[in-house]
Amino acid sequence: MAVDNLSTGRLGNLDAVGQHPEFHFVQGSVLDELMVDELVNDCDVVVHLAAAVGVKLIVEQPLKSFTTNIRGSETVIGAAHRWRRQVLVASTSEIYGQNSACPLAEDATRVLGPPTVSRWAYSTAKAVDEILAHFYHRQRGLHTTVVRLFNTVGPRQSPAYGMVIPRLVRQAVAGQPLTVYGDGQQSRCFGHVSDVVDCLVRLLEHPGANGEVFNVGSQEEVTILDLARLISARTGGVSPIEMIPYEEAFTVDGYEDMRRRVPDTTKVRALTGWQPTRTLDDILTETIAEAENELATIAALGH
């Protein structure tokens, strides 16, 4: 069973599984307490991935993002407690804020800017989610696991809302300039969604994950400028790279970014044996092929 309000997705993403007899999709929001309660009662395990995500959305709609993330988690975790269901809560690498002492272990110090900066509202909201999961486990015995995801990417990911790889790839296949924000020296690690799902399943099935928090992601680090260069080269090298200052890219004052974001995944590897199987090159190959097919389909429909 899957629940989604489709605010950042589309039904077409479910074409491959939509007709499976054991799959059921419900269009709705995690803010709907009655619906969530009924659905949690009908399931065995809860995987809470719902959130307002993407840098662009978070920065430009901070209040909506903040309240959605906190209230949604209150609703889901509360229902899991009422029905005594195991729950996995998806958190984020944003938890670590400006801490660039990479690789970041789960007990690394959070370093945040002022609360008036929209970027840190998301980090704070996800920290509240983690706190809820932690204390429901410690005080009420709820089976909880928290995962901090580091830039999960893969098929059907929307280029909207600040998702950098699908955005750059679609710019490249369309022959448009590849827009890189700031000086491009900020670095990230990108994990394939299939690898991430494999990790989540392992954690859900391992009793040692109860009450724990884990980093989940690739450790293959790349600067955003080098990422743009890779994508340009892989798509024929015809698209120039355009550097955009942060103050032009985002419609808010005081935007702050992190220079590095690399996970220490020792803990999850030690418990489950998990490690990524797909490289950045694999991810780009798949994403570029998908974008080129989309462009060809649009062109065919246009004729």
Image (cartoon, grey):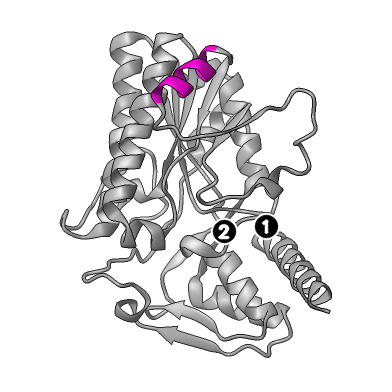
Q: Quadrant of the C terminus?
A: bottom right
Near-viewer residue (241 or 55): 55
Q: Which mark is residue 220?
A: 2
Tell me whether the residue at label 2 lies in contact with that at label 1, contact meaning CB atoms closer than 8 angstroms. yes
| Residue beneath the point at 31% across and 15% down | 138
Classify residue 56 as left or right of residue 283. left
Residue with the mark numbered 1: 279
Instruction: Give percent across and percent down for residue 40.
Output: 51, 17
Amino acid bearing label 1: Thr
Q: Is residue 28 covered in magenta?
A: no
| Residue beneath the point at 56% across and 86% down | 177
Chief SS of the magenta region: helix
The Cα atoms of the two marked residues, 2 and 1, are separated by 8 Å
Amino acid bearing label 2: Glu
Residue 98 visible to an observer of this rendering = no
Near-viewer residue (10 or 200): 10
In the rendered view, would you say 262 is above or below 244? above
In the rendered view, would you say 279 is above or below 297? above
Near-viewer residue (4 or 157): 4
Magenta-highlighted residues: 33-41
Residue 89 visible to an observer of this rendering = yes
Q: Is residue 39 covered in magenta?
A: yes
Classify residue 192 as left or right of residue 16. left
| Residue beneath the point at 25% across and 58% down | 118
Instruction: Give percent across and percent down for residue 202.
Output: 62, 27
